[in-house]
Amino acid sequence: MYFAVALRRIFSFWPLAVGWLRVGVDLIIMQLFTHYEEWRRAITEVCGMDLTRDYCETRIAALGDESDPATQAFLTSYGAGYRDTVQEWFRRAEREALS
């Protein structure tokens, strides 16, 4: 009897614990790229991708399409403000690709 009550109490707090953990993880991830230079280095040097004009245009459009499931997941995880920041970084990379 006491064991069942104890388990019920532990698991009643589980959603709160998971919620706090998720918020903490999201904040850490969002803070990974706080500057354009960090973001650009991660894409070009760490991932080995080219920030071409076409690629940047595609990513800007995809992040702007709120009906896209991937964009919805991004917005849920990081918020519209961070999405806007990333779109601006892609615009800057696009301008630099044209130079």
Image (cartoon, rainbow, N blue to C red):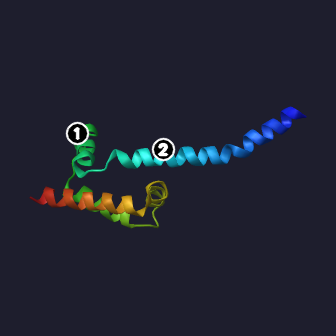
Mark 1 belongs to which amino acid? Glu
- For the C terminus, the quadrant is bottom left
Q: Is residue 88 left or right of residue 14?
A: left
Mark nearest the camera among 2 and 1 is 2
Q: Which residue is mark 1?
A: 45
Residue at 41% from the left image edge and 63% from the top image edge: 80
* SS state under label 2: helix
Q: Is residue 74 above or below residue 67?
A: above
Q: Is residue 34 left or right of residue 22?
A: left
Towards the viewer: 73 or 5: 5
Residue at 77% from the left image edge and 41% from the top image edge: 9
* SS state under label 1: helix
Sequence-first tag of 2 and 1: 2
Report which quarter residue 48 is drawn in.
Answer: top left
Q: Which percent across, then down, holds residue 52?
A: 20, 54
Residue at 44% from the left image edge and 60% from the top image edge: 79
Residue at 37% from the left image edge and 47% from the top image edge: 31
Residue positioned most to the top? 3
Q: Is residue 44 left or right of residue 79?
A: left
Q: Which residue is mark 2?
A: 25
Mark 2 belongs to which amino acid? Val
Q: Is residue 23 left or right of residue 30?
A: right
Which numbered marker is on residue 60? none
Residue positioned most to the left? 99
- For the N terminus, the quadrant is top right
Q: Is residue 39 above or below residue 45?
A: below
Labels 2 and 1 touching (C-beta < 8 A): no
